[in-house]
Amino acid sequence: MSTATSTAPAEPTSDKTRSRGQDASSQAVITPVRTRRSGIWLAAAIVLILIGAIGGAFLYTTASNTQQVFVSTHTIERGDTIERDDLTTIALAAGQTTAAIPVARADEVLGKIAANDIAAGGMITDSDLTTSLPVPSGQALVGLELKSSQLPAQTLVAGDEVVIVPVATQAATGGITTVDPSTTVQGTVSQVRASTSTTGTVIVDVYVEARSAANVASQAAAGAVAIYLAPGD
């Protein structure tokens, strides 16, 4: 007698295999989720670029909104003729209130006479410049063309107090004229400059009392004066 055995239908292996294959395939093609880190770095890079651009624009704007003005390289004495070596420049922010003369007006500065003492590093203004120093009331300005033997060894500058003294000269008759050394004249140096002649003399402009000017000028023309620094100078 045979016993009937019931066998459950086997699950098709092809379906399982297919299912597992599909799962593996699906996992292989899944794209990883992008994190926010790359976005943060991108934003940071953009910010840095913008900061650099803004900084560059600021520097350009600052540089283009300045003006160069004249300042003295050293102390300039009243009465000195201002030359190129006496000057340098500094930059000031545009719109800054100042009386300093800009470099564009160089022709209005060079060759002018200092109307005041200008300290080293001081800005040059219109009030510091003149074409000639004014003659004080009651005085006259006399020019003396002098040799080194008629000058003190110390270089004279504007403002020096000096004494003009007559000296003996060779007379036309061959004799030597005598003078009274006591007839001296007090004076104040206005300007000192080299003579344009080839004699190597120096021209010293001196303020003297108006009543003495004619006599001093006459003696100076004859080469019959010398000067020395007044006591205390």
Image (cartoon, grey):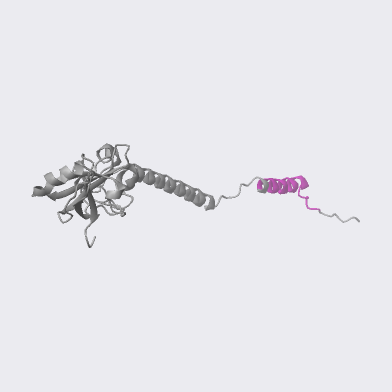
Q: Is residue 15 left or right of residue 83?
A: right
The image shows residue 21 at horizontal and vertical percentages of: 72, 46
The one of 124 and 3 positioned closer to us in this rendering: 124
The image shows residue 200 at horizontal and vertical percentages of: 32, 41
Give the residue displayed 48% in from the left and 51% down from the top.
44
Marker count (numbered): 0
Q: Is residue 99 visible to us here?
A: no
- Which quadrant is the N terminus positioned in? bottom right
- Is residue 193 covered in magenta? no
Q: Is residue 208 visible to us here?
A: yes
The one of 28 and 177 positioned closer to us in this rendering: 177
Q: Residue furthest right?
A: 1
Give the residue displayed 31% in from the left and 48% down from the top.
148
The image shows residue 77 at horizontal and vertical percentages of: 26, 51
Give the residue displayed 60% in from the left and 49% down from the top.
32
Q: Residue furthest bottom?
A: 232
Q: Is residue 122 left or right of residue 143?
A: right
The image shows residue 161 at horizontal and vertical percentages of: 20, 56
Q: Is residue 38 left or right of residue 91?
A: right
- Is residue 23 covered in magenta? yes
Whether 182 is drawn above or below 202: the answer is below
The one of 210 and 136 positioned closer to us in this rendering: 210
Q: Main secondary structure of the magenta part?
A: helix
Q: Which residues make up the magenta segment? A: 7-26
The one of 34 and 18 positioned closer to us in this rendering: 34
- Which quadrant is the C terminus positioned in? bottom left
